[in-house]
Amino acid sequence: SRSLLLNPEGWIGENWEDRGYDIISFFPVFNPPDCSNCGQGTGDLEVDYQDTSIDFWNIVDTLSPVAIVTFSRGYIDNSWELEWKYYNLTTWSNDFTPPYLPTPNPPESDVPINYIRYSSLPLDTIVAAIDSSGLGLTAYIDYTDGAGGYLSEFKGYHGVWYKAEMDSLNIPCYLAGHVHVGGLIDWETAHEAAKITLREVIKIVDDYRELPGDINDDGVVSIMDLLLIVFHLLETNEMTDEQLQIADLNFDQTITIMDVLLLSDIIMGM
């Protein structure tokens, strides 16, 4: 955080690790910080739908981030859980303060109820990096339905929603997704795992194309690009090495239905 109240030792995110990007974090404060039933908290992104949404849009409007990683507490274990998909729900769990549900509900009015948006974080490489770090965490990708139907999914959905909006305007926001942090992970370990995650994200931002998904290099992302992937998967068309690189939207070194879903999300957001 850049707040001296929250970070009295000073902000270290400017040109973080000389990688060319500022890392800025926002989070609520809980008293005591090491809590089980922590309540709503105070400050930015409180455990409250209205506060989180207002704060989120103010933050992205001010900063225009090129990548968004949201975090929240997950299971009470040592897991580093990467969420794959997020729903435009109406069936959220209640928060602490009236109104207990999002307003509006569902949050996004321009797509159907239960519309799914997907993480664009490099999930596989993050898992591999955490696994090889020696931190003793259980890193995995959650491919099941959604990210919990509470503030975690709400925040995660906001991140991938914002990315889709920026894609439609051809404004760089290359990656977005959510991480559930196990509740038994100590601060130092979580700090190191977060840094590993950010390094993997930055690698992809460095490599990302100005127009992600423009496989046929015609200056727009359209159904024609989607068909190239589909025909490739059906083995009726071969793509060049450059096209394969552009089509690999989740950066897992292979072209699968996941890339089709991510490209569909980009096109639908336009």
Image: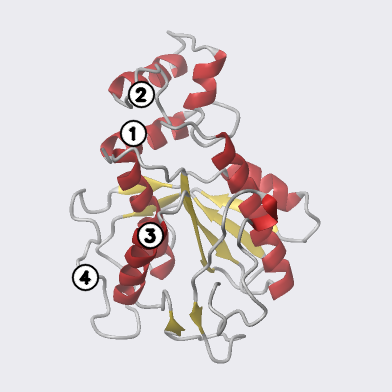
The span from disc 3 to disc 1 (Cα, nearest Å) is 23 Å
* Up-down relation of residue 121 to residue 156 (above or below): above
* Up-down relation of residue 10 to residue 36 (above or below): above
Q: Nearer the viewer, residue 20 or 98?
A: 20
Work out whether residue 186 can be spotted. Answer: no
Tag count: 4
- Tell me residue 255's x, y (percent): 52, 25
Asked whether the residues under the numbered discs 1 and 4 touch, taking CB atoms below 8 Å apart as contact, a structural biologist would say no
The span from disc 4 to disc 2 (Cα, nearest Å) is 34 Å
- Tell me residue 128's x, y (percent): 70, 45
The residue under label 1 is 264
Q: Secondary structure at mark 3?
A: helix
Asked whether the residues under the numbered discs 1 and 2 touch, taking CB atoms below 8 Å apart as contact, a structural biologist would say yes
For marks 4 and 3 on the same chain, the one whose residue lies earlier in the sequence: 3
For marks 4 and 2 on the same chain, the one whose residue lies earlier in the sequence: 4
> What number is the disc on residue 60?
3
The residue under label 2 is 226
Q: Name the amino acid, label 3.
A: Val
Q: Secondary structure at mark 4?
A: loop
Image quadrant containing the N terminus: bottom right
Coloring scheme used: secondary structure
For marks 1 and 2 on the same chain, the one whose residue lies earlier in the sequence: 2
Asked whether the residues under the numbered discs 4 and 2 touch, taking CB atoms below 8 Å apart as contact, a structural biologist would say no
Q: At x 54% / y 68%, what residue is drawn?
A: 74
Image quadrant containing the C terminus: top left
The residue under label 4 is 103
Q: Secondary structure at mark 2?
A: helix
Q: Nearer the viewer, residue 197 or 5?
A: 5
Q: Name the amino acid, label 4.
A: Thr
Q: Residues within 10 Å of mark 4 (few under 14, many from 20)?
A: few
The span from disc 4 to disc 3 (Cα, nearest Å) is 19 Å
- Tell me residue 252's x, y (percent): 59, 34
